[in-house]
Amino acid sequence: MCYAMAHRGPDAQSFFNDDKISLGHRRLSIIDLSETANQPFTDVSGRYTIIFNGEIFNFSEIRKEIPEYPFRTNSDTEVLLAAFVKWGPSCIARFKGFFAFAVWDKQEKNLFIFRDRLGVKPLYYYVDNEVFCFASEVRAVLASGLVTNVQLDKYATVDYLSFQSFGYPDSPVSSIKQLEAGSYIVINDGKIEKTVYWTLVKNRPSFDFSDENAVKGHIRELLRDSVERRLISDVPVGAFLSGGIDSSTVVGLMAEVSSAKPATFNISFSDPAYDEAKYARIIAKKFDTHHTTINLKPEVFLEELENGLNAMDVPSADGINTFVVSKAIRNAGITVALSGVGGDELFAGYPFFKQYTDLHKWRNLFGHSALFRKGVAGILHQTKSVRNHRLAELLSGNSVAIDRVYPVFRRILSSDFIEVLTSLPMDRISGTEANLRRYAGELEKLPLLSQVSVAEYLGYTQQTLLKDTDQMSMAVSLEVREPFFDHDLIEFVLAIPDHIKNPKFPKSLLVESVSPLLPGEIVHRKKQGFLFPWDVWMRNELRSFCEKQILILSQRDFIHGKELQAYWKRFLKGDPAVRWTEIWMFIVLGYWLERNHIDH
């Protein structure tokens, strides 16, 4: 199991064995680089042993609250364990950071397993009548040899084809599950008990939101603190710098809170349609960073394709870009990098935020007339726009609640089309829909824009964006820290009324909160996004690779092979109704199944 995750921790490997338990750990040394801080780590009494993946950014403050504990290291791991010894599971409320960790209580024979609030760090497990097996990756659980039923989870695969990820509580393997973000479990005498200790919808800060300037000032303070905490490290810390609003904000605040020059990295491309290097240089110059521009040619991406696919712990249609960029930064000598990921979700940066509020306006205007709404929906259906088809579906429906609307907007393949291409079971709602419905009552109490943020966190952000960031950066032993995923910041921004958050220009609340940090040419530039011409590559340089994977996948019993191959041919002919993402999801899935020897 440890060998399967060697890339996550190349610096050390250790084991702990007791009568009922074995714990293994791979270490990426970042805080207290000494061997004394290696894990598994046992407390001074010998009763408690911990294995821990992640970072506790406020460990120095917590350490001061435990003066009676005889610390042997300067690590956050020992502080985490000492806090558990003193306060038990309730210690979790004190931690600021991202983590998955387990504590074994030798005396009571209890195993406690925790996952961070937002699910930044993964945790998968397998359980049967004889064994409980857990790890940071599905591949490590499979490598244990303890999983007796290694079969594709076909219900979860419907979720993947719908939303490009395997959502909570499932994984690609039917017998392996995810631990819920913001929860912990206790295992004792064959019984498993789960506790949810934090959710996105039940934490309301006490604040006077009538004072807009005070709101902006507090956002700046929270974000500044978040950046400062994420600079804690005993190895060099760099930053991704695209030159967009989010990454530029992070770098600007790094320069503000640190006496050292930030080390920034920008990925440059020869094609100006994809190159953002000039904007990154503006920020690097403004904040006097040690800036490195890494030029990546398209052929590098193509050469790295199979390496990226091999690095995937779970299939993702979106992860290759992150792998290639992470590898380039790791090769530049950086072990820890700050990222601006998460700014769009928090500060209404996606088009869907406006579309959702518009939908409510239209519903209020036309809601009394089902006939009128269906007429408008009919007109929208006449167009070729995927967005208009989605709007039509929503207008003709009976509800515009976020748990009904979000899955429609985020869906890649429709249920009808999944039935055309596969024989997968369609009689279960998706994990994304189920999670939203769990919190439907609480979601309705939030401002409309915050409802979208929560839906994004529970859906695409947690299940795709954070997974890709973690699995593809850790594949090259790079730890990525995301200041916008600070839970104090998120709790506050989710409580802000729409009239303050509603963007007058892209992410205006964020820009105004940190003003005058960002220059105008950064704020008002056209958003490019981290996109590459996959549709062109798949018809040319990658055609033979894609055709091979399509043919192999077509032999699977749940795939309608002739229909999938016909769909591929439509794509090759340039049919605008066939998007490259839809084809690519099948290619990635097939490759992953073959590589990991998953049964039909």
Image: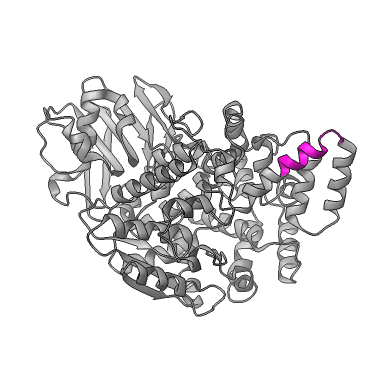
Which residue is pictured at 74% across the width and 55% down the height?
386
The picture places residue 47, in percent across and down from the top left corner, at 17, 26
Which residue is pictured at 18% across the width and 30% down the height?
65
Is 213 contained in the magenta span? Answer: no
582 or 115: which is nearer to us?
115
The picture places residue 368, in percent across and down from the top left corner, at 84, 33
The picture places residue 388, in percent across and down from the top left corner, at 77, 53
419 w.r.t. 306: above or below: above
252 w.r.t. 114: above or below: below
Q: Quadrant of residue 243?
A: bottom left
Which residue is pictured at 58% across the width and 69% down the height?
545
Q: Mark yes or no: residue 558 visible.
A: no
Q: Quadrant of residue 562?
A: bottom right
187 or 450: which is nearer to us?
450
Q: Residue furthest bottom?
A: 270
438 or 339: which is nearer to us?
339
113 or 87: which is nearer to us?
87
* Image coloring type: one colour
3 w.r.t. 187: above or below: below
Tally of numbered tags:
0
Q: Mark yes or no: residue 413 visible.
A: yes
Which residue is pictured at 18% across the width and 45% down the height?
38
Q: Which residues are magenta?
A: 359-369
Q: Quadrant of residue 430?
A: top right
Left/right placement of residue 159 relative to residue 239 reads right
Is 363 contained in the magenta span? Answer: yes
Left/right placement of residue 559 relative to residue 239 reads right
Prevailing SS of the magenta stretch: helix
Left/right placement of residue 307 relative to residue 507 reads left
